[in-house]
Amino acid sequence: SIKVESDVTIEGSGGDQTALADKSKDTTNQTLVMNNEGNINLRGENSIGIYTDNGTIQNKGIIEITGSKSAAIFAENNTIVSNTGIIKIGNEGVGIYGVSYQDISNVQSYGDGSINITNNGMITSNAGEKSVGIYINNNNTSPTSVNSNLDLKAGAIDLSTSNSGLGIYANNT
């Protein structure tokens, strides 16, 4: 498990940066937990705040990813996401991006391809265009594929400052 405490800030301004990343090849249970209670602030293009493959992501803090084409949270393959914090995204950014598999032709032997996202926090865009609050793509084509879930009980998505912004994109969810 990795935990960013409330008094910790991770920041960067270069492109292609990732604040926290890990994957678990454990086939019996999800042992990987990424927990942010602090501040993640990345300003470069193509950056990722938190990436997890076959684990759990919990955001209770602030993730501000303002570089173009960046994602605050990137969840893949049997990952559970819970956002009760604040996510701020920039031009063509994504607040929470969930996908069964990045490469459907090379499916991992661990995890089940599910994506489960709960947003009880706030996702906002700071400017630009084509920002997406939550993008969830269940591209699992296995005959035993499982459902992915999106739960929006108390959260909010405000992309009013993004031209052509999209609150939620959901495929096979």
Image: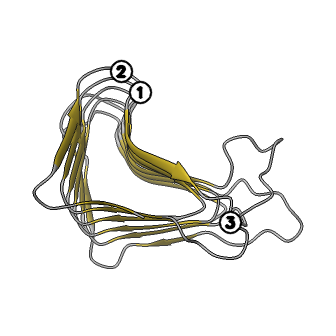
Which residue appears farthest toward the right when viewing the image? 143
* Cα separation between marks 1 and 2: 6 Å
Q: Position of residue 163 (x, y in %)?
A: 28, 33
Q: Is residue 144 left or right of residue 16?
A: right
Q: In which quarter of the image is residue 102?
A: top right
Q: Is residue 84 above or below residue 13?
A: below
- Which amino acid, by three-letter code, is at mark 1? Asn
Q: Name the residue under label 1.
A: 46
Residue 12 position, x and y percent, is: 24, 29
The residue lying furthest to the bottom in this view is 153
C-alpha separation, residue under disc 2 versus residue under disc 3: 31 Å
Q: Earlier in the sequence, mark 3 or mark 1?
A: 3
Crowding at dot 2, Cα within 10 Å, few <14 / some 14-19 / many 20+, comes out as: some
**Would you call the spot at circle 1 few (<14 residues within 10 Å), some (14-19), or many (20 or more)?**
many
Amino acid carrying mark 2 in the image? Gly
Using the image as rendered, state which of residue 49 and residue 66 is in the foreground: 49
Q: Is mark 3 on a helix, strand or loop?
A: loop
**As displayed, is residue 79 above or below residue 130?**
below
What amino acid type is highlighted by mark number 3?
Asp
Considering the numbered disc 1 on the image, is that residue within a helix, a strand or a loop? Answer: loop
Disc 1 vs disc 2: Cβ atoms closer than 8 Å? yes
Q: Going 10% across and 57% down the picture, which residue do you hit?
A: 7
The percent coordinates of residue 173 (x first, y second) are 61, 66
Q: Quadrant of residue 38?
A: bottom left
Which residue is disc 3 drawn over? 26
Residue at label 2? 15
